[in-house]
Amino acid sequence: MVLRSHGCTTIHLILLYFSVNAFTSFANDTISGYQTLSGDQTIVSAGDNFVLGFFKPGKAPRHYIGIWFNKVHNQTVVWVANREIPVSDPNTAKLLISGGNLVLLNELGSEIWSTAVNSTSAVNSSLAAVLRDDGNLVLSDGTGSNPRSGQILWQSFGFRVRGPSDWDLKDYSGGCVREMSLQCNGSNGRGDKFWPVTNVGLPVNEDLLTVGSVGECESSCFNDCSCTAYAYDEGRGCSVWNGDLVNLQQLNEGDGNGKVIHIRLSASSLVFSGSKNSKGSMIGVVAGCVGGALVVVAVVVGLIWRRRKRAVGSSKAVEGSLAVFTYKDLQNATKNFSEKLGGGGFGSVFKGTLPDSTVIAAKKLESITQGEKQFRTEVSTIGTIQHMNLVRLRGFSSEGSKKLLVCDYMENGSLDSHLFHANEIKFLDWKTRYQIALGIARGLSYLHEKCRDCIIHCDIKPENILLDPEFCPKVADFGLAKLVGRDFSRVLTTMRGTRGYLAPEWISGVAITAKADVYSYGMMLFELVSGRRNSESSEDGTVKFFPSWAANAAVNGGDVLGLLDPVLDRNADAEEVLKICKIACWCIQDDEDTRPSMGQVVHILEGVMDVNPPPIPRSLQVFVETQEHTVFFTDSSTDQSSQAKSNASSNA
C-alpha cells in the first residue's frame, strides 16, 4: 500500500512538472493563450522542420526570438521578431499572447515587439500561435477546444508561393507572390509606402535613372506601379527594380559594402499598421527568405529536374532549365489539341494540363524549317530570356516537322478580348490600360536593347499580349522571329505580321529593324485608348481610321478625353491620355529613324522624360486636313519633311 501510494504521488508530480514546463517538450508547436515562452524553451513544428525560441548570434549578450531550421547542423535562422531590439536575459523575457496579440516582453516587462493586430477578440484563451511545418508562424483566433483551426489574424510569412504544385516538386524557380497586394496610388491614404532595409547586398538587374536627389528617386519609383524597390547612392545615382528582387542579400554587421534598399509595401502591411518595432519583423522576413532560399537551393538543386521528370512523364531538362516533351506528351496534355486558345502567323495555341496539374499553353509552330540542332540551340537561348513582361517559356517538343513550344497559361487571356469584346460590367479602367502600355514597352525594350542579340518580335498586336491574374502584361511569341531567322526578305514579310500593324518599310520589302516593332506598338496604343480596332467599316461603305482623329487631337489641341473608349465614360487622366496619343504618333512616323526607341518610350511613360508635340505622319496629313478618317494602310513614301526629323523626346 505504501509503495502504491508513493508511486501515484510520483506520477502526479511528473505530470504537474510537464504541464508547467510544456514548452520544453519538442512535440509542442503551439503557444496558447495561457502559456509563455522564455529561457531555453522552444516550440517545434509538427514535422520537426523548424524551431521557434530565443537564440544568441555570436558571443555578445544579445538574444532574439526567431525561427530556425531544426535539422540543419549549423543554426540557420530564417525569421527574427526583435532584430533591432534584442533582450539581454531570455530567462526573464517572455513571449506570450496578450491583448489579442503575440507580444515579446523584455526583462523589465516592457513590450518590445508585437504582431500589432487590431483584433476585436479580448479573450486570449481563444488565440493560438502555431509554428507550421513550412516555417510560418501563424496567430489564429479559434473557438472551442481547437483555436488552431480558426481565422488567421497574423502570420510571419509576407508572401505565398506562386505555384504550389512546383514547390511540391522542389522546384522553387516560380518564386512567391505577395499576401497583401500593392495599392499603388490608392485613395484614402491606403496607397503604398517604402520600407528601408539596411546593410544589404543589392539585387541584380536594376535600372538606373537620372535624377537629382533621393526624393526624386523615391518619387519616380512611387509613380511607377510596377517598381518594387529603389536605392539611392550619391556616386551611383538612382537604382530601381521592377518585378522580383533577385539575389537580395542581408550582409553581416560591419560589412563595409552594405547598402540601403527601400522596398515597396502596401500601406496596410504589418510594418506600417503596427508599432515601429515591427521593422525587425520586416527585415527578418527579407533576410530569412534569402537565407532560407539559399539553404533550400543548395540542398535540392540536384533533385529539381529529376523530380519534374517524374511528374511530366518523359520530359527531361536541357540547357536553360527547359523541359523537353515528346509530341505524345503534349497530345495527351491538350486532349489531342482540342481546346484552341488562339492563333496567328506563327501557329495555333492550345490549352493543356500536365500530369502535375500545371496548366500550360502549347503552341504548334508552322513553317519552321530549321534543322534539329539549330532549333534546339535557338530554343535554349530563348529559354534564358526572362522578364516580368515576357511570357515564360517552360519547354518544347521537336520531332521532325512537329515543333511545339510550351509556355505559362494566362488565365486573363489576351488583351484583345478585354478591348474589343468587353462590356460595361467588365472592362479595363484607364489606370490599368496605362500600366499595360508601360509593361509592354518594358518587355519590348528588354528584347531590343538588353538581350545579347536584339530580338525583333515582328507581330506586336493585342492578340499577342497576355494578361496574368493581376493584369500585368506579358508579351507572347517574342522569340519566334528568332526561330524563323533574321532573313527579313519580301517573302518573309508576306508570311509574318498582321495587316494594320505593319510598318511602311516592311510593306515595301525593305529589311526591317527593331523600329518595326515600335510602329506596331504605336498602332496598338491607339487601340488601347479607343477600345476598338483602328479601322472600322461603316454601313455607307466608308472606312473610319482612328489614328488620324487621334493625331489631330494630340497635335492641334483637341478633346483627348473624347478619344477614350466609351465604357470609360471620360474617366481618365487627360494628361496621360494626351501623352499616350503623342507617343503613338511618334511611334508611327513614316521614317523609322524618327521613331523613338522602346527604351525612350519607357522613360516617357515613367515620367522621367518629356515628349514633344509630334509631327503628323505624312501618310495621315491629308486625312487630318480633310477631317476624314480613311484607310491609312497603303504603300507610303519614306520621304519626310524636315519637321518629321525632330526628336521624339527630350530629357526632362
Image (cartoon, rainbow, N blue to C red):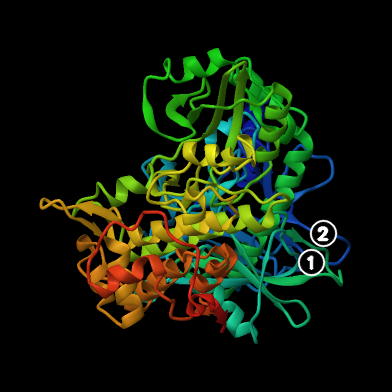
Does residue 587 lie above or below 541 as drawn? Answer: below
N-terminal-most mark, 1 or 2: 2
Does residue 281 lie above or below 46 as drawn? Answer: below
Q: Is residue 179 left or right of residue 419?
A: right
The amino acid type of the residue labelled 2 equals Pro
Q: Position of residue 468 (x, y in %)?
A: 44, 46
Does residue 453 lie above or below 251 as drawn? Answer: above
Q: Residue furthest right?
A: 59
In the image shown, does 94 or 175 lie closer to the viewer? Answer: 175
Binning the other alpha carbons within 10 Å of mark 2 as few (below 14), some (14 to 19) or many (20 upward) gives few
Q: Which residue has dot 2 on it? A: 57
Looking at the rendering, in which quadrant would you find the N terminus?
top right
Binning the other alpha carbons within 10 Å of mark 1 as few (below 14), some (14 to 19) or many (20 upward) gives some
Residue 205 in sight in this render = yes
Q: Which residue has dot 1 on it? A: 62
The amino acid type of the residue labelled 1 equals Arg
Looking at the rendering, in which quadrant would you find the C terminus?
bottom right
Q: Which mark is residue 406?
A: none
Q: Residue furthest bottom?
A: 212
The alpha-carbon separation of the residues under discs 1 and 2 comes to 7 Å
Q: Position of residue 632 (x, y in %)?
A: 33, 58
Circle 1 sits in a helix, a strand or a loop, which is it? loop
Q: Residue at x 39, y 40 (%)?
A: 411
Q: Residue at x 64, y 86 (%)?
A: 213
Residue 323 in which image quadrant: top right
Q: Are marks 1 and 2 in contact (CB under 8 Å)?
A: yes
